[in-house]
Image (cartoon, rainbow, N blue to C red):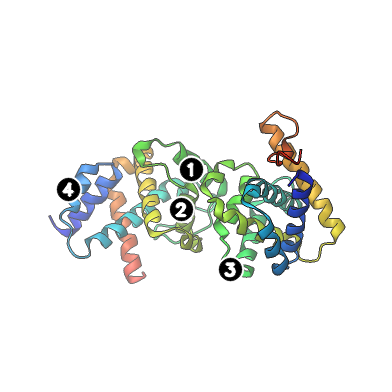
Amino acid sequence: MNYTERSRLFREHATAMLRGDRAESQRMERLIYPDHYGAHQLFIQTLFIACIIDHFGETLDRAELDRFIARLRSERPGVSPLKTEALVRVFYGETHLYTDIPQVDHWPCMWTAAQMILGPNRSDAELSELYEHAEATGREMLSGVFAAGGLFGFRDDEEAQ
Amino acid sequence: MTPEELHRAVIRAVAFRDAEGEHRLRMRFRGLDHDSAADYLHATAIVCLTYRLGATGPHGGINQLGEPVPLDHAELGRFMAELRAAGPEFGPRRNFLEVEAVIRGVYGETHLLEEVSPQQQHEALRLVLRYLTDSVPEIREDFDAVIDKAQAIQRHWLVGS
């Protein structure tokens, strides 16, 4: 699977997740194979960042975050308020919290926050713009750490090149 | 040695990092002494926190009976940075998000404690107690006064007055 196919798969899965279509998102999840997990984790993370910047802006107001977490507690019992709060703070400068949040919790915390921020009724065009924005953020983040071109295509299958 | 003297000696050994002394004293434990020691640890750690976060918070932290008032995020952030930087003599590397949750639990966000196992809560309180005993002269120099205040908190838990 090459970059374009993978990107389409991730986006279609994200659209199903954000619209609350569990049957469709679970069908897509079966198509996301273990060798895509690394890339998918990064995709979800950049999508999450795009959502929280959309919601909280460039600087984080802790009172606003408290209100958001209070909403999470009442609307989405079972999703960790502590870890979701910490994941938001990670991307507003408290990166040291990142290693204290088990990876297994990233998925539910990040999807839940994204669903709460976006709601189920975004149009295809709006979501498409969000995904472009998320990928741009991801490229920026990676190139800020590793000075190499073509990074966003990492883990393309050899034959697909 | 009366039970009270035993527990004073144990909490002092914990705070001043006398592992051998603590072990020797714990050999004398009977019946509910382990539960009592856990209560002493909890109450003493709360008292120590008031010396650091109580006195300097804009709203006064928690009062002498351990009743919560809101915590200053910036000051908590500074304290957490110090705990992260504290050396291995204060205990093994831990999940500091959980340590933060325990401290915020003390300051009224008790729902966060549901996300931290009793074992990790216990370890977090030990770290807080040890670090503050080492770094706050008022605690180190008059530890008996700290224990007296901790006993007042425990009486408050028992009789609610």
**Label 2: few (<14), some or many (≥20) within 10 Å?**
many
- The C terminus of chain B, quarter of image: bottom left
Amino acid, disc 1: Phe
Q: Chain of mark 1?
A: B
Decide: marks 2, 4 in contact (CB < 8 A)?
Answer: no
Q: Position of residue A80 (x, y in %)?
A: 56, 60
Which residue position is annotated with label 1?
B79
Structural distance between the alpha carbons of marks 3 and 2:
23 Å
Helix, strand or loop at label 4? It is: helix
Using a 10 Å C-alpha cutoff, classify the residue at mark 4 as few (fewer than 14 neighbours), some (14 to 19) or many (20 or more). Answer: few
Q: Please give the residue where the numbered disc 3 appears in the rendered image.
A: A77
Q: CA distance from mark 2 to mark 4?
A: 29 Å
Q: Earlier in the sequence, mark 2 or mark 4?
A: 4
Would you place residue A50 above or below residue B86 in this image?
below
Q: Is residue B58 above or below residue B134?
A: below
**Distance (Cα) linking label 1 and label 2:** 10 Å
Q: Decide: marks 1, 2 in contact (CB < 8 A)? A: yes
Residue ID for mark 2: B103
The quadrant in which residue B86 appears is top left
Position of residue A16 measured from the top left corner of the image (x, y, whole percent): 74, 63
**Contact, mark 3 vs mark 2 (Cβ under 8 Å):** no
Q: Amino acid at mark 4?
A: Arg
Separation (CA) of disc 4 from disc 3:
45 Å
Q: Which residue is mark 4?
A: B24
Q: Which numbered disc, 1 or 2, marks the residue that appears first in the sequence?
A: 1
* Chain of the residue under the numbered disc 4 shown in the image: B
Q: Are marks 1 and 3 on the same chain?
A: no
| Circles 1 and 2 on the same chain | yes
Q: Is residue A8 above or below residue A25?
A: above
